[in-house]
Image (cartoon, grey):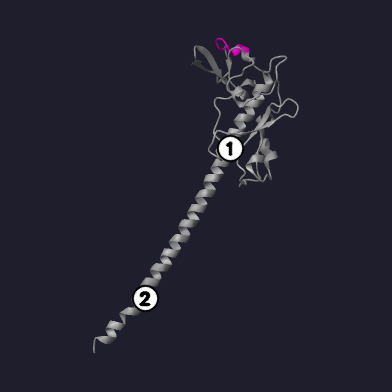
């Protein structure tokens, strides 16, 4: 009988320990859920920044395709593949290194905006209908993307590639890139020779065509 009070005195401590464990598990669950949510937001923001970078590459390629258009030829591609190999020239002329994957959908499929008159491509956009996290504070070249309700409204056209604020603009004719690369006098040349089925391929960033 003398040990009875001591025995029953352990039960409240055990109850508090169990309750504390439940509270700890609940807190861990909340923290884990919050971490997953934050991780998802961070992942989406990274994907958005990547989409802006990829979209900028498409913009530059479309702008380059237009700038070097030979007389009498269309200045807009019929398909995106023409940015990889410009069919208007007998040699291999590329305005884009590759068809990038859409960072939002993870696929290589892109929506294309076509001219009402020519039915040719004047812009590209993601096929994702999700709502963007970023809706403001865009760079000046992407100012038209502010306030959009889905990624499908983030349309990248050639005009978004940007042009120098001042100074004379000189363009390189792609015909000059089909043979040996012309001599350069500055440090802005990024022409990279490669081979493709025996032909010489020259890649260049359209911005490097501006002297």
- Residue 91 shown in magenta: no
Q: Is residue 181 highlighted in magenta?
A: yes
**In terms of image quadrants, where is residue 60?**
top right
Position of residue 186 in the picture relative to residue 197 (left or right): right
Which one is in front, 163 or 78? Answer: 78
- Residue identifier under label 1: 51
Q: Residue at x 55, y 10 (%)?
A: 180
Q: Secondary structure at mark 2?
A: helix
* First-in-chain label (2 vs 1): 2
Residue 162 can be seen, yes or no: no
- Which quadrant of the figure has residue 54? top right
Picture mark count: 2
Q: Residue 48 at x, y = what percent?
A: 58, 41
Tell me the SS state at disc 1.
Answer: helix
Q: Which residue is mark 2?
A: 15
Horizontally, residue 172 falls left or right of residue 4, namely right
The part of the chain drawn in magenta is 175-182
Residue 122 locus on image (x, y percent): 69, 29
> Quick one: label 1, few (<14), some, or many (20+) residues within 10 Å?
many
Disc 2 residue crowd, few under 14, some 14–19, many 20+, Cα 10 Å:
few
| Residue 18 in sight | yes
Residue at 69% of width from left, 15% of height from top?
Answer: 70
- State which quarter of the image contains the C terminus: top right
Residue 93 versus residue 58 in the image, above or below: above
Query: Mark 2 and mark 1: span between their CA atoms?
Result: 54 Å
Q: Quadrant of residue 143?
A: top right
């Amino acid at each position: 009988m003398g040990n009875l009070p001591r025995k029953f005195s352990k039960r409240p401590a055990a109850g508090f320990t169990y309750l504390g464990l439940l509270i700890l598990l609940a807190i861990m669950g909340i923290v884990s859920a919050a971490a997953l949510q934050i991780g998802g937001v961070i992942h989406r923001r990274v994907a958005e920044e990547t989409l802006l970078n990829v979209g900028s590459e498409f913009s530059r390629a479309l702008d380059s395709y237009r700038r070097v258009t030979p007389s009498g030829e269309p200045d807009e591609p019929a398909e995106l593949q023409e940015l990889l190999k410009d069919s208007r020239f007998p040699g291999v002329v590329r305005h884009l290194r590759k068809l990038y994957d859409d960072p939002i959908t993870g696929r290589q499929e892109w929506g294309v905006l076509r001219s009402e008159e020519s039915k040719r491509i004047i812009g590209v956009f993601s096929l994702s209908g999700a709502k963007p996290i970023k809706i403001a504070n865009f760079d000046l070249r992407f100012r038209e993307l502010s306030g959009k309700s889905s990624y499908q409204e983030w349309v990248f056209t050639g005009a978004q590639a940007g042009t120098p604020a001042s100074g004379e603009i000189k363009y390189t004719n792609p015909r000059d890139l089909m043979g040996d690369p012309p001599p350069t006098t500055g440090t802005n040349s990024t022409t990279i020779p490669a081979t493709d089925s025996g032909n010489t391929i020259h890649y260049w960033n359209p911005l490097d065509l501006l002297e």
